[in-house]
Image (cartoon, grey):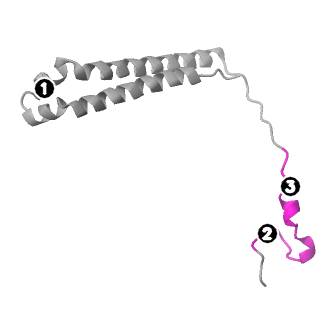
Amino acid sequence: MISDPKLPLASGSTSVGELRSPAEASVPLAPVTVSRPAPSVARLWLRRLGVLLFVFLCATLGVMLIILPWRPEWSDNPLLFSYPTFRAVVASGFVRGVATGLGVINVWIGFWEAIQYQEEE
């Protein structure tokens, strides 16, 4: 028996009269609507607080990464005194620019989350 790959599989019998045509097989089913219970007040405030803390953390770390690489403390760090090669790499303009770019991205992510926040209805 040769089967046509375009025809849907029949459950049970394989007689030609019981197979459905492709037009019948593509009839969409009715959408199922699921009603969700309203979130509690505590859950709503916890979500708001979580978003607020996330935005604050992203903005703070981002501003620190934007400003700190251009300060003297970035390369005159006592932790780097024993590693002169690593100190030279950290003091390079490329590494400072990468850190500043990551800071800008971090600030952008924080504010994007604040803008995109929506309350559940």
Callout 1 crowding tier (Cα within 10 Å): few <14, some 14–19, many ≥20: few
**Residue 6, how many percent across, how many down?**
77, 70
- Lateral position of residue 106 relative to residue 86, left or right: right
- Lateral position of residue 111 relative to residue 75, left or right: right
- In the drawing, what numbered circle is on residue 9? 2
Residue nearer the viewer, 41 or 104: 104
**Residue 106, how many percent across, how many down?**
40, 26
Q: Residue at x 58, y 15 (%)?
A: 45
Q: Residue at x 19, y 22 (%)?
A: 74
Which residue type carries mark 3? Val
- The residue that disc 1 covers is 79
Looking at the rendering, the stretch of residues picked out in magenta corresponds to 5-30
Which residue type carries mark 2? Leu
**Residue 116, how many percent across, how many down?**
58, 24
Asked whether the beta carbons under mark 2 and mark 3 sit within 8 Å of each other, the answer is: no
| Magenta-colored segment: predominant secondary structure | loop
